[in-house]
Image: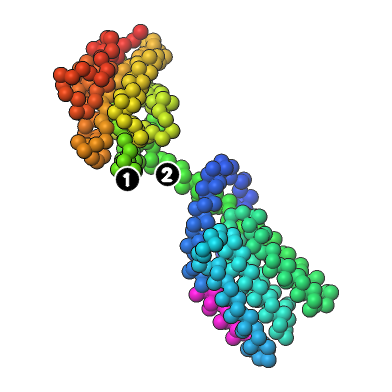
């Protein structure tokens, strides 16, 4: 039994000594915003809990000092009513810290004032006053906010204790209060550290579930979600949207002639190059194998063809060093533009796929547009030497 407790204490101490998590500022802001949302949801649920606590305190008041219990009850009820402004979202747009400051000031203030009013005095309520500090150590992840929340009730406590107590009792209460404050602040910092770790882990898991582990491009599932969202936005705002499907030409030959490792490097290099060539608002994902898709929001047909051609040309000029010498590869691209002929994601993807296969049939290393009449001039003429797309040079 003792052994278990010692191990637990050791684990706790080790957790407390965990090095701080170095979250980038943007992730730190996202974590705080996520925590604020959770805390905001929690606040209305606390109303019945604090209501019950007030009721129990009032019963205790009658037990301690029946003569002044009525006045104390009035103080407690007034505090509950005032605290209501913090429990529910209001039109003033108060943030979580402000709402917690109001709630804590009303409740802790009521405990302090009632203890001061009742005959046993403040030392009897030290346990409740100290315990109330800990409830605030989980509602914020910022030390500054925590100190701002507890500042006013702490000042009230010090003033009333100084007025009521003899010097020695005042000093003893102050030491207890400061000790509780220090512990509550440490709990808050520890809670923040655990929260940071959990957030970091969540972000890593999210990234893993959204991205292809080999290339780092979005995976099929995530790309579909993103594309559906972009399509809904395009539909709603009457904006254009295009999709380009890329397929590496004769990729099987790369694997057969250069090995799978080099094949993998080709896929990674393609993703790096395409991501570098696309805009921030574009999305690039791997459908599977050597097939990739670009979702291009706010892009019309002419822009999409230009973008696809730019990708094709920059990939065709890449030279990859391999043990067998430099390797170049090309891609065939099919472009489809959102419109009545392809009104949703599956239709758009199918159209881009068909256009891509037309590019393959037209000799590879070229761009084709969905819905383009077969006899019409090609959007991009097949590049020189497109028949033998994969070459060692
Ligand atoms: N190295 C590597 N190869 C892959 C991966 N996924 C699929 N492949 C290979 O990609 C090749 C695709 O070959 P095919 O579907 O015949 O297409 P292709 O050779 O590119 O021919 P075309 O598309 O007609 O130009 C297969 O040899 C697969 O094994 C991967 O993650 N890494």
- The image shows residue 78 at horizontal and vertical percentages of 60, 78
Observer-nearest residue: 214 or 142? 142
**Left-right relation of 98 to 266:** right
- Residue 26 visible at all: yes
The residue lying at 70 percent from left, 61 percent from top is: 182
Dot 1 falls on a residue whose secondary structure is helix
- Which is closer to the viewer, label 1 or label 2? 1
Q: Is residue 134 left or right of residue 293?
A: right
Q: Which residue is mark 1?
A: 236
Task: Choose the circle earlier in sequence order: 1 or 2.
Answer: 2
Name the main secondary structure of what is drawn in magenta.
helix
Residue 200 lies, with reference to residue 5, above or below; the image says above
Residue at horizontal 69%, vertical 66%?
Answer: 152
**Residue corresponding to mark 2:** 206
The picture places residue 117, in percent across and down from the top left corner, at 71, 82
Contact, CB < 8 Å: mark 1 with mark 2? Answer: no
Magenta residues, start to end: 48-61
Residue at mark 1 to residue at mark 2: CA–CA distance: 28 Å
Is 127 located above or below residue 254 in the figure?
Answer: below
- Magenta span includes 52: yes
Q: Residue furthest top?
A: 393
Q: Determine whether 296 is above or below 156 in the image.
A: above
Q: Quadrant of residue 310?
A: top left
Within 10 Å of the Cα at label 2, are there few (<14), some (14-19), or many (20+) other Cα atoms?
few
Query: Does any atom of ligand 1 lie closer than 8 Å to the CB of label 2?
Result: no
Q: Quadrant of residue 306?
A: top left
Answer left or right for 206 relative to 130.
left
Q: Is residue 252 visible?
A: no
SS at mark 2 in the image? helix
Residue drawn where x is 35% and y is 17% of the image: 313
**Residue 311: percent from left, percent from top:** 36, 22
Q: Residue at x 43, y 33 (%)?
A: 280
């Amino acid at each position: 039994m003792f052994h278990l407790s010692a191990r637990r204490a050791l684990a706790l101490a080790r957790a407390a000594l965990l090095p701080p998590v170095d979250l980038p500022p943007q992730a730190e802001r996202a974590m705080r915003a996520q925590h604020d949302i959770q805390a905001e949801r929690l606040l209305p649920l606390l109303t019945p809990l604090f209501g019950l606590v007030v009721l129990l305190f009032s019963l205790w008041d009658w037990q301690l000092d029946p003569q002044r219990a009525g006045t104390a009850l009035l103080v407690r009820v007034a505090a509950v009513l005032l605290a209501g402004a913090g429990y529910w979202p209001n039109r003033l747009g108060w943030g979580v810290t402000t709402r917690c400051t109001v709630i804590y000031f009303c409740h802790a203030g009521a405990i302090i004032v009632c203890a001061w009013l009742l005959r046993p005095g403040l030392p009897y309520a030290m346990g409740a006053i100290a315990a109330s500090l800990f409830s605030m150590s989980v509602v914020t992840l910022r030390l500054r906010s925590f100190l701002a929340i507890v500042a006013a009730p702490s000042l009230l406590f010090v003033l009333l204790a100084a007025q009521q107590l003899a010097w020695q009792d005042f000093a003893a209460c102050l030491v207890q209060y400061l000790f509780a404050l220090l512990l509550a602040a440490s709990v808050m910092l520890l809670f923040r550290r655990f929260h940071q770790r959990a957030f970091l882990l969540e972000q890593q898991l999210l990234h893993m579930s959204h991205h292809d582990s080999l290339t780092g491009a979005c995976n099929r599932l995530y790309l579909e979600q993103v594309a559906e969202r972009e399509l809904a936005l395009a539909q709603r705002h009457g904006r254009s949207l295009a999709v380009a499907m890329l397929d590496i030409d004769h990729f099987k030959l790369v694997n057969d002639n250069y090995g799978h490792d080099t094949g993998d490097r080709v896929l990674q290099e393609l993703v790096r190059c395409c991501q570098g060539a696309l805009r921030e608002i574009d999305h690039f994902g791997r459908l599977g194998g050597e097939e990739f898709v670009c979702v291009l929001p706010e892009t019309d047909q002419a822009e999409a063809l230009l973008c696809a051609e730019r990708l094709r040309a920059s990939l065709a000029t890449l030279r990859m060093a391999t043990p067998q010498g430099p390797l170049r590869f090309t891609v065939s691209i099919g472009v489809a533009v959102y419109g009545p002929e392809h009104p949703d994601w599956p239709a758009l993807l199918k159209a881009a796929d068909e256009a891509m296969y037309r590019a393959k049939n037209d000799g590879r290393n070229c761009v084709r547009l969905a819905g383009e009449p077969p006899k019409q001039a090609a959007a991009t003429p097949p590049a020189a030497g497109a028949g033998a797309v994969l070459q060692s040079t």
